[in-house]
Amino acid sequence: MNLRRTYFRGRARPGEMNRLESEYASHLKAREVAGEIAWWKFEALKLKLAKLTTYTPDFIVMRADGLLECHETKGFWQEDARAKIKIAAELFPFRFVAITKKRGQWVFEEF
């Protein structure tokens, strides 16, 4: 019997990066080498939004000036994901940034 789980296309297993997240991790590595950011980590933080609701940002990023940011990469946005990041931005003292890629360029949206 095969007990392997099936995941939707573009969705990696928890703790593993999908293609877009891997590309963004490479972008973060380049920014770290350039001295623009001091540190970053994939899925390192889980935020409690309500009793049974949590949000795990894709990346926690510490800028060179020490400011912590939560970065969320999306190929496309669904309303529940957008709602979670907006709620998190209201509750926690981090800068929340949504990242998409259009025509080969990173596009950033701050919440």
Image (cartoon, grey):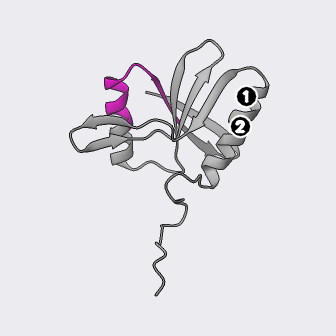
Judged from the image, the secondary structure of the residue bearing numbered disc 2 is helix
Question: Which of the labelled discs sits on residue 31, or is there none?
Answer: 1
Residue 86, x across and y down, in percent: 35, 32
| Quarter of image, res 34 | top right
Residue 91 x %, y %: 31, 24
| Residue positioned most to the right | 34
Secondary structure, mark 1, is helix
36 versus 48 height, above or below: above
Spot occupied by residue 1 in the image (x, y as percentages of width and height): 46, 87
Residue depicted at 23% across the width and 44% down the height? 52
Residue situated in front as seen by the camera: 76 or 9: 9
Q: Mark number for residue 27?
A: 2
Are discs 2 and 1 less than 8 Å apart at CB? yes
Q: Is residue 53 left or right of residue 1?
A: left
Task: Work out whether residue 28 or residue 110 is closer to the camera in this orientation and state it.
Answer: 28
Residue range (magenta) = 85-98
The residue depicted at 48 percent of the width and 83 percent of the height is 2
Q: How many marks?
A: 2
Inter-mark Cα distance, 2 to 1:
6 Å
The residue located at (58%, 28%) in the rendering is 61
Amino acid carrying label 2: it is His
- The outermost residue toward the left is 51
Residue projecting furthest to the bottom: 1
